[in-house]
Image (cartoon, rainbow, N blue to C red):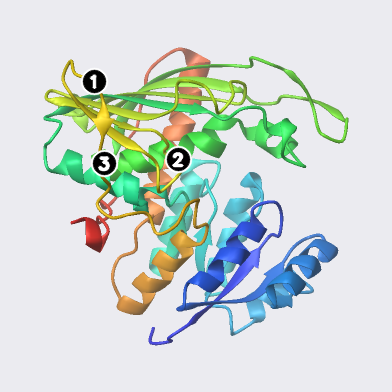
Amino acid sequence: MSKDRLGVALLGSGNIAAPYASDLPNYPHLKLVGVYDLIPARAQALAEKSACRAYSSFDALLDDPAVDIVANLTIFEAHYQTTRSLLEAGKHVYSEKPLAMRHTEAQELADLARSRGLRLGCSPFTLMGECQQTAWKWIREGRLGQVRLVYAEVNHGRIETWHPSPQPFYAVGPLYDVGVYPLAILTGIFGPASRVSAFSTVLMPQREARSGVPFQVAAPDFTVALLQFGGENGPLVRLTANFYASEKSKQDGIEFHGDLGSLYMKSWFAPDSALFFAPFDKKYTPVALIKPASAQGVHWSTGISELAAAIQAGRPHRNSAGQAAHVVEILNATLRSAETGQPEEICSTFDAPAPMDWAV
């Protein structure tokens, strides 16, 4: 595709849509052309603020020739069907996580995109951050020795204290909402996981939305998983995810432990996160990032920008559908293991993403 600017439409204008819309103008090869939401007033408000079109219907978005890429920002359970419809209409898609709720559906979407010559990418995009790329480079270069153990902590607090509509998050649980962040980083660095053993439970079953409406937690709000990566010689990962403990917990980020030393990434989310290294049995000291983070905070349209740049250059894109489908298989297998008390094998694979050009 030779277009200098690719048109982007947002499907869904909920809580996350405004950060996407405000970040899109930072990328000269992207142009926000429209937004659609099941609640017309919500779409209209975002469209007016972002100087773009509010579509009157989903079909109107599908029929707009100015739309090259659609960012699917719908609720979790809607990702599969809406992404399928977008691909069938000939649109490239960048989906919020997870790609689908079931691995069979996620793989179906990846296969459909491939068969139609379309691009399908998926959040999280955090492995592209300066801190995360620096950590990956240290691991690739063997500065930690063989990495045998990883601790990944996701204490995401109580969503009902800040999100206007927390119920959909509690319908799927923290593993699907935020556990995917470290999983995207770890699968990008170490490749596919092969086996998982897990435990899940509901710590706090009764919650109350900010509106005062009480609701029941439908999915486990706490999960801990032990994941084996890359066969017998790959690292063992302990992943913890919950909607109970505060984000201010002393347990946070990702720790990579190798034969020669350990690397601590304070945040799996922030591209400008602090990074620390400790030789074995020594204290942590700060690590300089490969390059300074371009700005504080998260650039929400980073994944869309990467997808568009790959389309224009004719190269594979990072945050591939194959990797996203593998992450969904991990999620599914983790909850099955928690239900049965037995380990689960993970069978899918994907092509490894490339490091950022500036991090090679």
Does label 1 or label 2 sit earlier along the sequence?
2
Q: CA distance from mark 3 to mark 2?
A: 15 Å
Quarter that holds the C terminus: bottom left
Name the residue tied to disc 1.
283
Q: Is residue 20 left or right of residue 356?
A: right
Residue displayed at 40% across by 59% down: 294
Q: Is residue 257 left or right of residue 211?
A: left
Within 10 Å of the Cα at label 1, are there few (<14), some (14-19), or many (20+) other Cα atoms?
few
Q: Position of residue 158 (x, y in %)?
A: 67, 27
Please state which amino acid type lies under the numbered disc 3: Ala
Q: Position of residue 219 (x, y in %)?
A: 64, 26
Does label 3 or label 2 sit earlier along the sequence?
3
Residue displayed at 69% across by 69% down: 35
Question: Is the residue 230 above or below the residue 283 in the image?
Answer: below
Q: CA distance from mark 3 to mark 1?
A: 17 Å
Residue nearest the viewer, comparing 160 with 112: 160
Q: CA distance from mark 1 to mark 2?
A: 27 Å
Q: Please, what secondary structure does the residue beneath circle 3 have?
A: helix
Name the residue tied to disc 3.
135
Name the residue tied to disc 2.
181
Residue nearest the viewer, comparing 213 with 101: 213
Q: Position of residue 171 (x, y in %)?
A: 68, 33
Q: Please, what secondary structure does the residue beneath circle 1 have?
A: loop
Within 10 Å of the Cα at label 3, are there few (<14), some (14-19), or many (20+) other Cα atoms?
many
Q: Position of residue 45 (x, y in %)?
A: 79, 67
Circle nearer the viewer, 1 or 2: 1
Q: Note whether residue 119 is visible.
A: no
Residue nearest the viewer, comparing 301 with 80: 301
Residue displayed at 37% across by 51% down: 129
Residue displayed at 20% across by 46% down: 137
Please state which amino acid type lies under the numbered disc 2: Tyr
Quarter that holds the N terminus: bottom left
